[in-house]
Image (cartoon, rainbow, N blue to C red):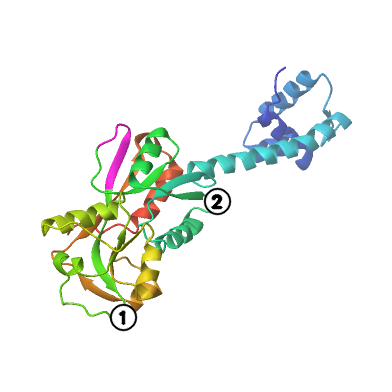
Amino acid sequence: MRRLNLDQIQTLVAVADLGTLAAAAQALHLSPPAVSLHIQELETRLGTPLLVRGRRQARLTPAGELLADGGRRLLADSDALLREVARRAQGFGASVRLGASAGVSPLLLPQLLQWLAEEAPGLELRVEVVSSAQALQRLAAGSLDLALVGLPQAEVPGLEMRAWRNDPMLLFAPPHWPLPEHVTAAWLDTQPWIGFAAGTHMHRLLAQWFAQAGLLPRPRMEMSFPEGLRALVAAGHGPTVLPREEPMDAISRSLQQRALSPALVRPLGLAQRSASRDDPAVQVVVRGLMRFADPPPA
């Protein structure tokens, strides 16, 4: 069965609202013969008259009134659908899955969500805490769209990587803990310090830093979550090494901070599937994340 033609329905509704074929033709930017043809094709399609044509005015038949009433709803639904498609094409009303390690500051996410609420209302961002290795595996499998991962990473077919941030690593210590001016691996090795769990990107970074001094990291306690580490340090259980991130939370501001010697940074990258390069919703989130990226070199 042939479907109704929305252009013809719009013509019938215009005639119903304006009363004459000539007025409908002017409003729709059509010629009067084109308006007449639309009505005739509808009448032929439905097998019944829709208009009673008078000398000065056209009047709808009962069938015409029924079709015009239903046609208004069809046209409204069509307009709403077109608006929704346009919004989706701009990245609104979609869902994007972002993987991030526990080491990425949770203070960045509320700012990102606020920016998305203003710039892309209706876009849903789903954040999952996963390791860098898990994030890349899930990106490749298609169950994530974007991921914040520690660098460097081996190339993975079908994935693209860009540098995102290089956060300096600092020692955070309880307020009254005696500290040297510069924190070395040799000094930290003598302290009851708290570290990241083995297998995490942060643990590998510190292991490489200790290795420069010919040492292995030997923390008294290990955790995978920065918030837990900061809470333990604030409670006086020992120092830890964490990236300095802005904005800094109240606990971090209350702790002593010292630079490491030699300096150490945590490099992070933003990974995405090559297939999502042209996805407008993904690109909106990418723009939001890049607001927190390091500025390009001068």
Residue 226, placed above or below residue 161: below
Q: Which residues are magenta?
A: 155-162
Taking the magenta stretch, the answer to whether it contains residue 258 is no
Q: Could you tell which of marks 2 and 1 lies nearer the N-terminus? A: 2
Q: Residues at badges 2 and 1 in contact (C-beta under 8 Å)?
A: no
Taking the magenta stretch, the answer to whether it contains residue 157 is yes
279 left or right of 221? right
Q: In what element is the residue under mark 2?
A: loop
Residue position for label 2 = 122
* Residue type (three-letter) at the residue carrying disc 1: Pro
**Whole-percent x and y of residue 220?**
29, 64
Residue position for label 1 = 175
Q: Which mark is residue 221?
A: none
Residue located farthest toward the right when viewing the structure as drawn = 62
Of residues 172 and 188, the one nearer the viewer is 188
**Whole-percent x and y of residue 71?**
75, 35
**Whole-percent x and y of residue 175?**
31, 80
Of residues 71 and 259, the one nearer the viewer is 259
Which residue sits at x=40%, y=45%?
A: 283
Q: Nearer the viewer, mark 2 or mark 1?
A: 1
Quadrant for residue 294, please give it. bottom left
For residue 69, say whether it is visible: yes
Quadrant for residue 172, please give it. bottom left
Which residue sits at x=42%, y=44%?
A: 282
Q: Residues within 10 Å of mark 1 (few under 14, many from 20)?
A: some
Q: In what element is the residue under mark 1?
A: loop
